[in-house]
Amino acid sequence: MDEHVQHQRRHDGYVATRTLLLGLTLVLPLSFLTLSFLLTSRETIGSAELLTNEGFEDGTAGWKPRPLDMTFITVTEPVHWGDWAAALDRSGPTSEIYIFQDVSVVPERAYTHTAEVYKYQARFAEACLRIKWLYSTSPEVEVCVEVDYDGYRPITIALAIAPTDAITARVMAVGKMWTGEEGNPIYFDDLSFTSNPSPPPTPTPIPVYVPLVLKNHPAPVSILDFEPTSTPTALPVEPSLPHRKSDSPSQQRSQR
């Protein structure tokens, strides 16, 4: 086989191998980042519900009323979702009535408290959600709606940060009454209390080093690097004869 063809094939194989190895050095770290992102996403998508019987499908189980003489029942109409909702009421002196659950929390973690509320009775001044940090000196967090509305509407406490000394949160649904006269109760449905952990730090990609095998190729020869093996011999120069002018016509005749 021609030596030039063999050399060209070796060169092509070298280029292909180097290209493949360079591709691996780029693809492997990117694959690691993609896998890390997917694992991280699976950990952070969605938050676990920390309340029990949040939709009142199991009656009043898991919830406690205050004061104890208030009315706390579940009803099938009106409901926001499912078959049941909670109705809160009290006859007699005006006061604040609420139901609650106590939930363990992690200090400095964010929590979100949501619910659907149906307040359509002037004797209730406000319908509220409240988070009280038990055994902590930090103030409670509260969000309320005042305007009556013939239907359910959402209410939210978003990203409440648990204090550094908090270990338990009292999660509450509250009705603040104007008067104790008979009238419609206040309704809550689909309560929720979830944690919103801070996303984990982005993992540092582990670089993957693939050794590149470089073949030695003869360096091109520069004309400047050429050293002659012998001193060049100067060529002999033939001496030139003196120029002779042409004879005039008269001289040519006399010569004849």
Image: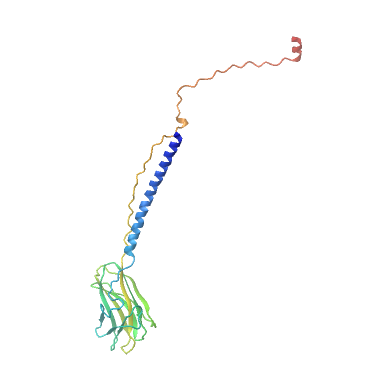
Q: Is residue 210 above or below residue 85?
A: above
Q: Position of residue 107 (x, y in %)?
A: 26, 67
Quadrant where the image shows the C terminus = top right
User: In this rendering, is residue 71 above or below 111?
Assistant: below
Residue 243 figure quarter: top right
Q: Position of residue 3 (x, y in %)?
A: 44, 34
Name the spot of residue 142 as percent of width and height, x first.
Answer: 32, 76
Image point 39% across, 49% down: which residue? 23
Number of marks drawn: 0
Which one is in front, 49 or 91? Answer: 49
Taking depth in this image into account, of 26 and 184 the one nearest to the observer is: 26
Image coordinates for residue 7, horizontal then vertical, percent: 43, 36
Q: How is the image coloured?
A: rainbow
Q: Quadrant of the N terminus?
A: top left
**Residue at 33% over, 63% down:** 42
Residue 231 shown left or right of residue 77 in the figure: right
Q: Residue at x 39, y 46 (%)?
A: 20
